[in-house]
Amino acid sequence: MTKLAQESSRIIFFIIPFSLLSFPNAAEPADTNYEEANVPEYRLPKLIKSDIRNPNAVTDWHEKRRPELETLLETHVYGKTPTNDLGPFETRMLDSDPQALKGKATRKQISIIIDASRQLSIDLLLYLPNEAKGPAPCFMGLNFYGNQTVHADPKIQINPRWMRGNTQIGIKNNRATETTRGVYHERWQIERLIDRGYALATAYCGDIDPDNYQHDFTDGVHPLFYRKEQSKPDSDQWGAIGAWAWGLSRMLDYIIESETAINADQVAVIGHSRLGKTALWAGAQDQRFGLVISNNSGCGGAALYRREFGERIHHMIKPVGYWFCGNHARFAHQEQALPVDQHMLLALVAPRPLYIASATKDQWADPKGEFLAALAASPVYELLGKTGLPTQQWPKPNTPIEDTIGYHLRDGDHAVTAYDWEQYLRFADRHFKH
Ligand code: GCU
């Protein structure tokens, strides 16, 4: 090879992985495996221990195996969520407007005050369908850059808290401004949800715990739960994903206690990417969520660690290790030794409906690994009298498959699109509206 050819192949080598970037802050390292042929042979840890023909198998699942799996995921992946009950939290209705979205919806903005001394509150934004005949089913999810990004509605308060810089949407000096209003409306499709009779509940993840790459666990909810003299979580205690999931449960508490326009048995928890990992962990732990949706959640979400395809644990440690518990990092390059894998996380959602969505160009998130985890979780659905995934074949792009577990591989990038929402709405209709 000539010197020039060598140089240009090196340049191409660097350009390709970086151009595939699924998120502006994440670098895709050169050791990332995207070849199916390089996936190691692996054996998933057993999901169900007792013989499923045993008459006690269902009771064993609920009373023994399910709690065991939850403990394993806490210990090695997300960390333990504290159980001390600080609530009920004081809430303040900041806005209630029955004429929102040209009269189609009622918009409410509620502050759930977590720690008044540190101005820590979860600012919940609700849109409720005015045409609903009774309490409406609801989609609930955290957003990345404040409620004002989810719709151009000028009445949505601009989130005042710290945010990661993002020049694409105009976040400078770590604060949101007017320029961010509505920038992610396509990710949320609020009119479409309202027209289909659904409510939306959202809040900014940084209200609960800032998604700060210099994360030191001092400025979110973690300090509220520290022992005397403790300054950061122990290696088996919750990271940021655990905190965000906790926040989703506090949003659900509010709906159960105070929002009669929403059917609290029909709240679907949804999230994209890191917030998809969060939706899965929230839905796994808090069985009050009636349906769970993961959009492109990838490594530490729906994808199987043991495939070592796309993003891996060692890639996460430096940039985003704080999403997980300290123990997680011990499995860097040691995926085969993890006592868990993500089929276990998905199985914790059973028998409730679960939807996993991947995208063809989101190889970093290992689409096939997301499908295989859903397939491997299916026996628990069967044990509990449901069908998980209806087929064993990884479907072609844009060909959703569904029973109590749904899955699709959308053609395109790491994103949430109108196509994704069409599938979520159909799936929710099927399970909520029978
Ligand atoms: C990065 C990170 C992923 C994550 C994604 C996101 O790409 O490596 O694990 O899912 O950011 O949250 O957008």
Image (tube, rainbow, N blue to C red):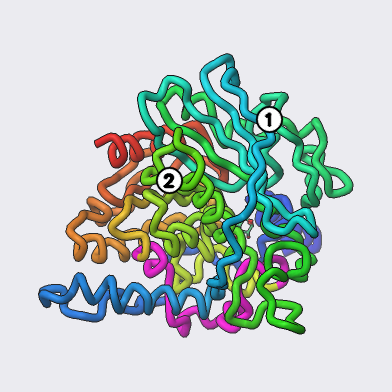
The residues bearing labels 2 and 1 have C-alpha atoms spaced at a distance of 22 Å
On screen, residue 173 versus residue 10, left or right, reads right
For the residue pair 333 and 324, the one nearer the viewer reads as 324
Tell me which corner region of the image, top left, top right, bottom left or bottom right, holds residue 413.
Answer: top right
For the residue pair 432 and 145, the one nearer the viewer reads as 432
- Is residue 8 among the parts visible in the rendering? no
* Residue 87: image location, x then y, percent: 58, 60
* Residue 120: image location, x then y, percent: 73, 55
Tell me which corner region of the image, top left, top right, bottom left or bottom right, holds residue 178.
Answer: top right
- Looking at the rendered image, the quarter that the C terminus falls into is top left
- Number of other residues with Cα within 10 Å of mark 2, as a class: few under 14, some 14 to 19, many 20 or more: many
Q: Residue at x 46, y 62 (%)?
A: 303
Q: Residue at x 47, y 49 (%)?
A: 269
What residue type is disc 2 on? Ala
Q: Residue at x 62, y 42 (%)?
A: 124
Q: Which residues are magenta?
A: 318-347
Q: Which numbered dot is residue 268?
A: 2
* Residue 15: image location, x then y, percent: 72, 53
Which residue is the site of mark 1?
Answer: 182
Q: Earlier in the sequence, mark 2 or mark 1?
A: 1
Q: Which numbered dot is residue 49?
A: none
Residue 339 part of the magenta-drawn span:
yes
What residue type is disc 1 on? Gly
